[in-house]
Amino acid sequence: MLDGCFSVKVAHVDSEIWAASDQSEDALLLRVPDTVVPGPRIDRIFNAFSGAGFGVSPGSLMTLRGVELGPVDGIDLGLRPANVLPTELGGTQVLFNRIPVHIISVSANQVTFTAPYRLEGTSAALQVKRGEQSSNELLVPVVEANPGILAADFPSPDPESLPVAIARKQDGTLITPSNPAPAGSTVWIYATGLGATNIEVPSGAIATTEALRPAADFREAAGLPSTYGPFPTPLDPSGARAMIGFVNSVFAVPIVVRESGEPNGRTLIRITPAIQTRGASRRSYSPATILYVCKTTQTGSCQAQQ
């Protein structure tokens, strides 16, 4: 038992914390390693397709990035999973307002999940849980739409880059510099973060009908990310729709492409709600992605621009 009052001197020696009484330089009271076992930590959240972190919208596919979020050997169930997405994957749970949500992929530094389709309020609290360890809580704005276009840099999108969109022609072939889309034709891009749907569905489920569509209409908006329109190009009248067999956070969006003004046929595309709601801002626009378009010759063939 220690009697009386005394102060303690603390020093950092060889990765250890030493504490000693000021009554004797040799009287060691405590010596512990200063290494703290790290638990999960969330650094940021963003649209899983675009990398934009403006907020979370109903049913959107979102990604958390941080440390110790999942197993070193990542697990990815893909956009076309065999079953309904689980609420725990690789020992990781994502809590959305303290309720576990469905996870599509998990690794040590990021987790991709589906936001609930029923979102209330102006913000939501997110947290990652692994076993008995819980991460910091992240407060995220809730928005009506935070559209993002699937691009070649998925699942690690860079919001500062201009990635090439994953897009297909009507014949199903992938659009590339050597296989551009004819100007004036309708092509399919793929998006998430389009907001509430016309049919009430649970998040994390697999789409079973193309009748599932965003409740809001969307249009294509030309220009760079700093350009907010007008410059609308009408979407195909049939509109965006879910894809059977894919997770119901992902939609196929038909776009009528314009002729490119660049020699290589490169054009930029973005999508936005057709009707902007009060308070809408740049978060309502998807970041720009690249699409390759060709000129049509007099014979109707597609001439690639190199």
Image (cartoon, grey):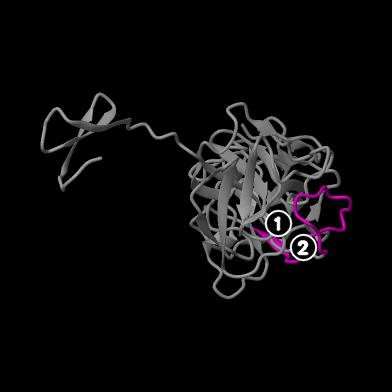
Q: Quadrant of residue 35?
A: top left
Q: Are marks 2 and 1 in contact (CB under 8 Å)?
A: yes
What's the magenta region? 199-220
Q: Quadrant of the N terminus?
A: top left
The structure residue drawn at horizontal position 76% and vertical position 47%, both measured from the top left corner, is 188
The structure residue drawn at horizontal position 84% and vertical position 39%, both measured from the top left corner, is 171
Q: Which residue is mark 2?
A: 197
Residue 289 in the image: state x and y as whole percent: 60, 45
Residue 52 in the image: state x and y as whole percent: 54, 51
Q: Note whether 176 is above or below 282 in the view shown.
A: above
Residue 11 on the magenta segment: no
Compare residues 2 and 7 and report the one nearer the observer: 2
Compare residues 40 and 153 and report the one nearer the observer: 40
The disc labelled 1 sits on which kind of residue? Gly
Residue 280 relative to residue 165: left or right: left
Q: Which residue is mark 1?
A: 59
Furthest residue toward top = 14
The structure residue drawn at horizontal position 19% and vertical position 44%, both measured from the top left corner, is 3
Q: Note whether 104 is above or below 202 in the view shown.
A: above
